[in-house]
Image (cartoon, grey):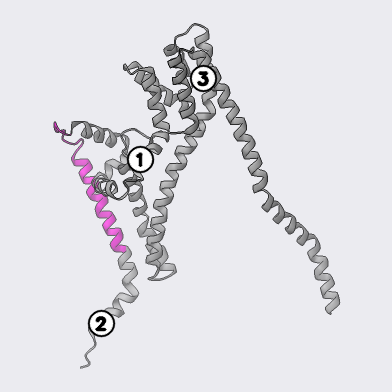
Amino acid sequence: MVDIPTSLILSQIVEPYGPPIFACLLFGIAGFVLARSIANTLANEELVQGEQWRYDVSRINELRKVSPFYRLFQTVIQPLAKFNRGAFVKDLPRIARELQAGGFPRVWTAEEYLAKLELQALFLLPLYVYGCVQIIGPPGIVIAVLLTVLSGYLLRRRLAGQAAYRLVLIKRRLPYLLDLITLLMEAGATFIQALKQGVEEFREHPVGVEFGRVLGEMNMGKGRTGSLEALRDRLQDDELTAIIGSILQGENLGTPLSRIFRTQADVLRLKRSQRAEQMAGEAAVQMLLPGIMVMASTVIVILGPFLINFLYTDLF
């Protein structure tokens, strides 16, 4: 009887079946986490609200209502959020500003939303592992991990892009909102009445949503200055900060609000035209290289057959 080394037997088993077993193991872990999250979700409608943590628990209960993803994977998102508080201390304030500027529900905290993005990227890991291992082999596991990290980074950049795009939409419509408020105030309406009418007119637009929050805070007793300062801190944009600062300064000096709004609307239009001119100038420079490449390709297409014919006739 021939003794076969145990290492040889394991190598014969693991080498052909190792990557599929690893991929199946990842799928199994993901399925277990999903099943456990669903079970916990169905077992408990709302968290128990203690006296000490009643405000945070109320926020979490509201978050469970507005976000089905958080509701399903709360048991995983909470530990990840705790990890993010220590690992991404410097990035959390920026993420919080982007969540506010992007119009996301206020019940999200920066670390919890970052944990959501991380979990979404982790869900892609088994697919990356399976695809890369099938194409490259066992070294594809490293590439799959890198693709997962890249997916998390792209999701993070997507959040920043959404916030920047929403700010652009707000700055495009803000002059028209200020013009409407100015006309209503010059016609005899108070600032609250004019702002309410403006919010109603732009209720489907981000600028209407943001000034609707300003109106809501003022209706709840917050001062006009405090509401506008909250809007400035919420959006964190240089142009909007300058405009809101000018409005607050004019109000402190006693300048009529209608005159301030009309002036700031004109300033916004001027900045928008200047930004359009800048983009047009940059576009001309950016189109220079593609234009040269198109011209070179056209020359090659036109002169290529003649050159080939000349070389063929000369050589043969």
Q: As drawn, is 62 to the left or to the right of 244?
A: left
- Are the two marked residues, 3 and 1, in contact with CB atoms closer than 8 angstroms? no
Q: Amino acid at mark 1?
A: Pro
Q: As drawn, is 142 to the left or to the right of 29?
A: right
State the residue lying farthest toward the top.
Answer: 188
- Are the two marked residues, 1 and 2, in contact with CB atoms closer than 8 angstroms? no
Q: Earlier in the sequence, mark 1 or mark 2?
A: 2
As for residue 212 lying within the magenta part, the answer is: no
For disc 1, the marked residue is 93
Residue 59 against residue 313 in the figure, above or below: above
**Distance from Cα at disc 1 to Cα at disc 2:** 53 Å
* Label 3 CA crowd tier, 10 Å (few <14, some 14–19, many 20+): many
Q: Which residues are magenta?
A: 24-53
- Return the residue nearer the eye: 13 or 7: 7
State the residue lying farthest toward the bottom.
Answer: 1
Q: Amino acid at mark 2?
A: Ser
- The numbered disc on residue 178 is 3
Q: Nearer the viewer, mark 3 or mark 2?
A: 3
The structure residue drawn at horizontal position 31% and vertical position 43%, both measured from the top left corner, is: 111
Q: Amino acid at mark 3?
A: Leu
Helix, strand or loop at label 3? It is helix
The structure residue drawn at horizontal position 70% and vertical position 56%, both measured from the top left corner, is: 293
Helix, strand or loop at label 2? It is helix
For disc 2, the marked residue is 7
Residue 163 against residue 4 in the figure, above or below: above
| Image position, residue 294 (x, y; %) | 71, 54
